[in-house]
Image: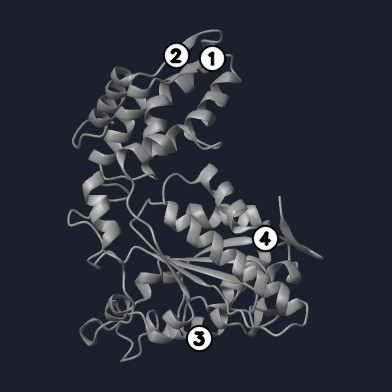
Amino acid sequence: MREIERPHLRIPTPREIYTELDRYVIGQEVAKKTVATAAYNHYKRVLQRRSGLDRLIKKSNMLLVGPTGCGKTHIARQLARILDVPFTVCDATEYTEAGYYGKDVEVMVAELLFKSDQDVEATSRGIVFVDEIDKIARRSHGARTGAGSRDIGGEGVQQALLKLLEGREVFVPLNVTQHWNKHDFVLVDTSDILFLCAGTFSDLPIHDPDRSIGFSSSSARERARRRRVSQKALLDYGMTPELLGRLAVTVQLHSLSEGDLCRILSEPPDSLLREYTALLAADDVELEFPPDGCLAMVRHAIEKKMGARGLRSIMEVVMRDIMFRAPEIAGTQCRIDAAFVEERLEAADMELEPGEDR
């Protein structure tokens, strides 16, 4: 495998990154290639900077746009694993403009510092995933927060993020649980930290009219692919030009099809079917999962608008009784076909009917 190598930093090529992402992330081919290329270019910039060369390459911070359950967080997490750098997930709605009650944006870097065991050098080349970035869109005059005309949780946070995204030395609290305490700070340079911001931007016209969560029909998905999100649409949504200017790469993810969800259940090395097969094998129980059983669970996820995230909760319901009895049925085989899945899900729905005795 050809890699760029420097002390303390090894960068796989874009194809190597994409190939590894492809093992764990189903679908989203264009998004995976875009992320792989942007990440490679970002860490080339890091090497140039640390080698004292002219920094012609700009930061490749990314904006990921797509429906809930389509794999935005999963791609970011796998990217950090491939590059072997510290990684943290932050929710943009928890932060406020400096000086107001809530978290200052520097706490994002503090959480990354915590994940790297207080290693400042490792922190300075890590990845921060900022979720729900669309929830801090600039609010209209008719939807103020009650704090006068200052939009402290929307535009104020966008403005505060600028210094982190563009690269600045910031004082970061060492104790993330007491970040309001103005003692025990450390200086961290964010110039080499890769920021991935993500949001659903659910009111943009790129989404399907039925507002499906994480999946859609193939024809609807193809229509969504043709509707590319524009900078103007993001500006109209409430994102500031300054913030968008520091998110150089926009990655648009599409909703997942029935076939994608079936593949998610079985193909990745860490898939749910592999996990439950291993769990039952520890009790000497053989698990057989025919395709119709997988399809029944996927269709239930689509019907309930649960998306890929809902597959685990569905699997828990389907496997609950078998997992409970596993030590008692050692040496047996369990076949999870469509009839079994539908029976267990129907029974679970009846258990949750309102008004019944618990």
Earlier sequence position, callout 3 versus callout 4: 4
Residue 18 lies, in percent from the top left, at 55, 52
The reply to whether discs 3 and 2 touch (Cβ–Cβ < 8 Å) is no
Placement of 11 over or under 337, stated as above or below: below
Q: Residues within 10 Å of mark 1 (few under 14, many from 20)?
A: many
The residue sitting at 31% across, 43% down in the picture is 257
Tell me the element at label 2.
strand
Q: Which residue is mark 3?
A: 98
Earlier sequence position, callout 1 versus callout 2: 1
Q: Amino acid at mark 4?
A: Val
The reply to whether discs 1 and 2 touch (Cβ–Cβ < 8 Å) is yes
Q: Amino acid at mark 3?
A: Ala
Q: Which residue is mark 4?
A: 85
Earlier sequence position, callout 2 versus callout 4: 4
Placement of 128 over or under 324, stated as above or below: below
Specify the quadrant of the image occupied by residue 211.
bottom left
Tell me the element at label 3.
loop
Q: Which residue is mark 2?
A: 334
Earlier sequence position, callout 4 versus callout 1: 4
Q: Amino acid at mark 1?
A: Val
Whole-number angstrom distance, CA of label 3 to CA of label 1: 56 Å
Considering the image in quadrants, where does the C terminus appear? top left
Whole-number angstrom distance, CA of label 3 to CA of label 4: 28 Å
Q: Which mark is residue 285?
A: 1
In-front residue for pair 299/58:
58
Q: In screen coordinates, is 54 left or right of 322?
A: right
